Image (tube, grey):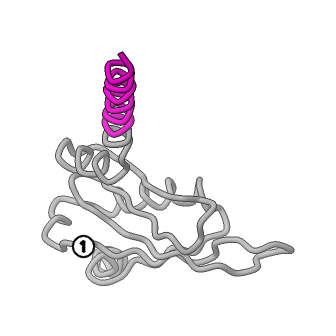
Amino acid sequence: MMIVILFRILILAALVLLFYTIIQYLKNPQRQLEIAKSTDEFYFVDEAKNSKKNIQFVYKGCLFEGEKYLGTPGDSFEVVDIHIVVRNPMELKGLSRDDLYFLEEEILIRYPYAKIEWKHPINQLLLSQNKN
């Protein structure tokens, strides 16, 4: 009789662990980032409380990563610089300067004191269209 009760407790624990694992899988930000990339949606992943953790976002199938830097714009420490790179430059195909402005607005909503610096080759799009 004791073995049957123990077996039932083990089955219940296994089911709880299984449901917990499924929920963690569905909530995984990297998985959601990949889904947004495949569906050409905008998705932003960030730990706002952790200044050492880079931001990642997807827009029109292109994966960007931003490195945050702290500074003091006033009387407190805030993120003042964000350097953005693209992992695969071939994904930039089809993006316009207006798309980059949209992304800057989305970042500035989250980090109002930040100066955004686009790294190569993204900055070439901004420079080439400003010359015209």
Q: Position of residue 68 (x, y in %)?
A: 53, 75
> In the image, what residue type sits under mark 1?
Arg
> Which residue is most to the right?
75
Query: Badge 1 local density, few (<14 within 10 Å), some, or many (20+)?
Result: few
Residue that appears at 67% across and 68% down: 113
Q: Position of residue 130 (x, y in %)?
A: 37, 76
Q: Is residue 64 above or below residue 120?
A: above
Q: Position of residue 26 (x, y in %)?
A: 32, 38
Residue that appears at 31% across and 34% down: 18
> Which residue is most to the top?
1
Q: Is residue 25 above or below residue 37?
A: above
Q: Is residue 109 above or below residue 13?
A: below
Residue range highlighted in magenta: 1-23
122 and 7: which is toward the camera: 7
Q: Position of residue 21 (x, y in %)?
A: 33, 40
Examine the structure image and report whether residue 105 is included in the region drawn in magenta.
no
Which of the 4 quarters of the picture holds residue 66?
bottom left
Image quadrant occupied by the N terminus: top left
Q: How many marks?
A: 1
129 and 65: which is toward the camera: 65
Question: Which secondary structure dominates the residues rendered in magenta?
Answer: helix
Residue that appears at 24% across and 51% down: 34
Q: Which residue is mark 1?
A: 87
